[in-house]
């Protein structure tokens, strides 16, 4: 079993290490790494989500799994917000600290890990469909919560205007737009009576282009993420980043396990939820903190540290919860 887990995680962290090595060797410049990350975030990853959702099986029963993931996310966000200051995090840094704890790198790390974990198993197709449909509504939640937490309060503005700022931030997010587009195509596919296999085999050149572009999301995202793991980010705000890592990779999966038990999730659903919760902090945590005036140094350090430490949290979930 240990060899199986190592075989699942090795390709993921090998590509992360490749990105870090290429950046250190000067083969990938900072500008190129940033450009690759933007290409994946604004292009390849949305295409992957659109294609995966459109080809998924809506009977996979993702509702309860998505509910468990959402409840766990809200719960750990509340824990992080309440404990940040008592743990020694500055009040000005609390929004960024909270965001790095509740926002997981599910698309860049979680989906690749599950794709490798499910490969060759009888439930491979159903597992990936369930994983994608579980993630789709939670991407909306992640981004809504991140915008809400990081938006600086403007007491002089009317409530409708403050809500509008949050809503506008959500509607600009390419992953949210991709999920909505994928759900629209899924509804169209069902209305046309096309099966997932027939849809996947479609000769439509547009669908083929989306699928081909989306296929670069996994390797591209992992190399770009690895290139972002610079020594400066690992050292910056290291004490607060370790506190965030403790909540993100230890407390969060434990909280999620309790939620899964309360909801009575079956093993496959439970594994998907726990795998998402054991992922590192999302790279978008750093991007949004920087763009919205948060503590970008803390967010960047937390992303780097949790990415390194997630090898242990993901291994624990794979050993303890992977069905079969």
Image (cartoon, rainbow, N blue to C red):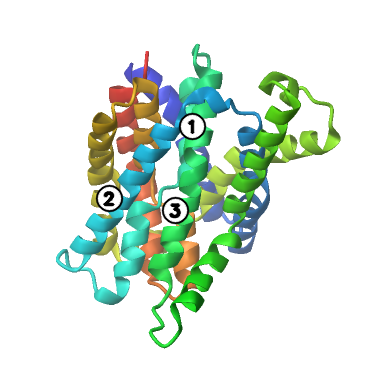
Residue at 30 percent of width and 76 percent of height: 92
Q: Dot 3, how many residues are within 10 Å of its Cα: few (below 14), some (14-19), or many (20+)?
A: many
How many numbered badges does the structure rendering display?
A: 3
The answer to whether residue 215 is above or below residue 322 is below
Mark 2 or mark 3, which is nearer the start of the sequence? 2
Residue bearing the label numbered 1:
131
> Which is nearer the eye, 47 or 228?
47
Distance between mark 3 and mark 2 Cα atoms: 13 Å
Res 75 label = 2
Q: Is residue 159 above or below residue 253?
A: below
Q: Quadrant of the N terminus?
A: top left
Residue under numbered circle 3: 142
Q: Tell me the distance, in whole angstroms, between the alpha carbons under discs 3 and 1.
A: 16 Å
The answer to whether the residue labelled 3 contacts the one labelled 2, judged by CB atoms less than 8 Å apart, is no
Q: Residue furthest left?
A: 86
User: Callout 1: 10 Å neighbours few (<14), some, many (20+)?
Assistant: many
């Amino acid at each position: 079993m240990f060899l199986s887990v190592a075989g699942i995680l090795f390709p993921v962290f090998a590509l992360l290490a490749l990105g870090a090595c290429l950046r250190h060797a000067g083969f990938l410049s900072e500008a190129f790494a940033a450009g690759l990350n933007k290409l994946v975030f604004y292009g390849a990853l949305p295409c992957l989500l659109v294609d995966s959702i459109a080809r998924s099986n809506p009977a996979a029963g993702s509702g309860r799994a998505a509910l468990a993931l959402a409840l766990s996310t809200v719960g750990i966000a509340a824990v992080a917000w309440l404990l940040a200051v008592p743990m020694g995090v500055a009040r000005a840094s609390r929004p960024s600290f909270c965001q790095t704890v509740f926002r997981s790198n599910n698309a860049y790390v979680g989906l690749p890990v599950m794709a490798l974990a499910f490969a060759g198993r009888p439930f491979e197709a159903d597992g990936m469909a369930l994983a994608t449909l579980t993630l789709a509504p939670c991407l909306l939640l992640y981004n809504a919560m991140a915008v809400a937490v990081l938006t600086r309060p403007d007491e002089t503005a009317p409530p409708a205007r403050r809500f509008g700022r949050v809503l506008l931030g959500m509607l600009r997010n390419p992953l949210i737009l991709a999920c909505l587009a994928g759900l629209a195509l899924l509804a169209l596919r069902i209305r046309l009576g096309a099966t997932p296999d027939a849809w996947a085999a479609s000769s439509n050149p547009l669908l083929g282009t989306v699928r081909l572009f989306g296929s670069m999301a996994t390797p591209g995202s992992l190399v770009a993420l690895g290139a972002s793991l610079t020594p400066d980010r690992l050292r910056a705000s290291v004490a607060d980043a370790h506190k965030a890592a403790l909540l993100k990779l230890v407390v969060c999966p434990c909280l999620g396990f309790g939620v899964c038990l309360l909801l009575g999730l079956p093993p496959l659903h439970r594994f998907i939820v726990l795998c998402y919760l054991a992922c590192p902090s999302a790279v978008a945590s750093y991007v949004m903190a920087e763009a919205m005036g948060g503590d970008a140094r803390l967010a960047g350090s937390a992303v780097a540290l949790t990415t390194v430490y997630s090898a242990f949290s993901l291994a624990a979930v794979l050993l303890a919860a992977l069905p079969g």
